[in-house]
Amino acid sequence: MFDFHATVWYTIVDFAITGHYDLARLGGNTPAKTPRRPRERRFYQQEEKMRRFGTQGRVYPDRHYVVPRTEEIADFIQRVKEGRYIVLFAPRQTGKTTFFRLALETLTTQDTTYFPIQLNFEEYEEYAAADFYASLYREIKKEIERVFRKHRKVPADALVRFLENTTITDHVSMHEFFRKFGERLVYHHNNWQRVILFIDTFHGIPLALENSFLASLRSIYLTDRPYCPHSVCFVSVKSIIQRDMVNAVSPFNIQDAFHLPNFTFEQVRELLTQYADEVGQGFGPEVVEALYKQTVGQPFLVNRLAEILTEEMDILKTELITMRHFSGAYARILQEHNTNFEHLLTHIRRDLRFEDILMRIVSHSIRGVFFDRHNECIDELTTNGVTSKGNDGTCQIANPIYFDYIRQIFGTQLKEIEQESLS
Ligand SMILES: Nc1ncnc2c1ncn2[C@@H]1O[C@H](COP(=O)(O)OP(=O)(O)OP(=O)(O)O)[C@@H](O)[C@H]1O
Ligand SMILES: [Mg+2]
């Protein structure tokens, strides 16, 4: 596809480097291109390798600017090594998948005795028990084969036979499977491999199966060590404890909750500096501050604003990114429909009581709302990253972008309320 802006940009760069415009790029009549000179070639090779601010799901260090979250990863790995059953729990688009993949990569590169089985329950919500466990087994088997391939090892014949002749039909046979699989790994492959089970989007598990599934893992955890899996990591938008409270039973009171925070100011600065170092275009210091302040480090929002500034506003790469540009990007993000705002809207519209609370928080004329975590609505809005506790003990909107967005949504209603209070 012809990308006019990119073309114009390359043409300008061409001129800066070679002193010539390549009119063919702009649809001009220049004859066939002459081969590039070495300096030019270097530039274009660099350009092809250039990374971006990622906003479409998980980010990859070779393609995107990535906050390494080194300390959090070290903490997480320590817990895995100790054989804990962890729940990594945070609202939508806060970097759960990216984090746990990076952590896994770091751990298995450091130490090949860890045997990671990675699953995702995203698509199971409507599944019946038999279909769920059949698919679960297929995925586990695929993962086992993948790990052997990655380690350049061949599974022992007995292990292959075991995998071929096994089925998992329910939580009891799943327990049985892990016990036998763990034993065979030890028996046939000299060094003890510690199996780690990672389950992304755990909340996608069919609701009717959740308790028995967790009870089964809990009973593995409570047997004598070594047990298989050695560690389990659930990635979810809800803490399992909270779900248990809803279900009024607690089959999983052994979980180790891992909170994934928003980016700190330093992490935001580091992310923007990666771009500045690579491209040579800086962000003014007040822009870095504003970007952090308006997003409070919410990972998606940070990246989306940076993406608008670096890719969608046609700011020359030779120009410093200033507050004038930032205001433009801010206005633009508030006008768009991105998946993050869609999630936000879904939460707001789910319950009329939510609308009422949010309206009271964003209104300039109504007194604030006390942050009471025992209030079911406030708890749910906070769990989903919409609200948070302010320093004065009141409930506030999680970041200024959400605040402005919510005010926009309630526009007319808010105006009426605010005018009424003036009259
Ligand atoms: N380590 C990181 N460095 C830079 N940006 C990140 C990082 N982690 C997450 N992000 C930003 O957050 C977005 C969402 O990341 P990711 O898909 O990992 O989150 P998630 O919590 O798993 O989302 P979901 O709830 O949709 O499953 C990314 O597209 C990117 O904009
Ligand atoms: Mg995810």
Image (cartoon, rainbow, N blue to C red):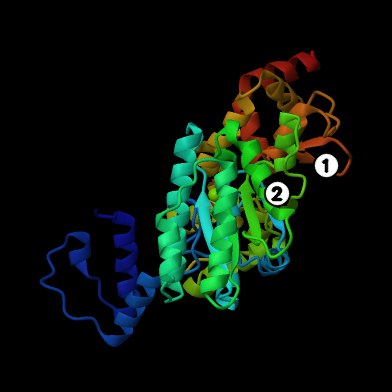
Q: Nearer the viewer, residue 108 or 93?
A: 108
Residue annotated with mark 1: 390
Residue annotated with mark 2: 219
Q: Image quadrant for the C terminus?
A: top right
Residue 385 shows in the view: yes
- Where residue 140 appears, as percent x and y from the top left, is 48, 54
User: Residue at left 56%, top 59%?
Assistant: 180
Q: Is mark 1 within 8 Å of ligand 1?
A: no
- Looking at the rendered structure, the kind of residue marked 2 is Ser
Give the Cα distance between marks 2 and 1. Answer: 40 Å
Q: Nearer the viewer, residue 27 or 352?
A: 352
Mark 1: secondary structure: loop
Mark 2: secondary structure: helix
- Dot 2: within a 10 Å radius of its alpha carbon, few (fewer than 14), some, or many (20 or more) residues? few
- Dot 1: within a 10 Å radius of its alpha carbon, few (fewer than 14), some, or many (20 or more) residues? few
- Where residue 168 appears, as percent x and y from the top left, is 49, 46
Label 2 vs 1, first from the N-terminus? 2
Q: Is residue 246 left or right of residue 406?
A: right
- Residue 379 lies, with reference to residue 140, above or below; the image says above
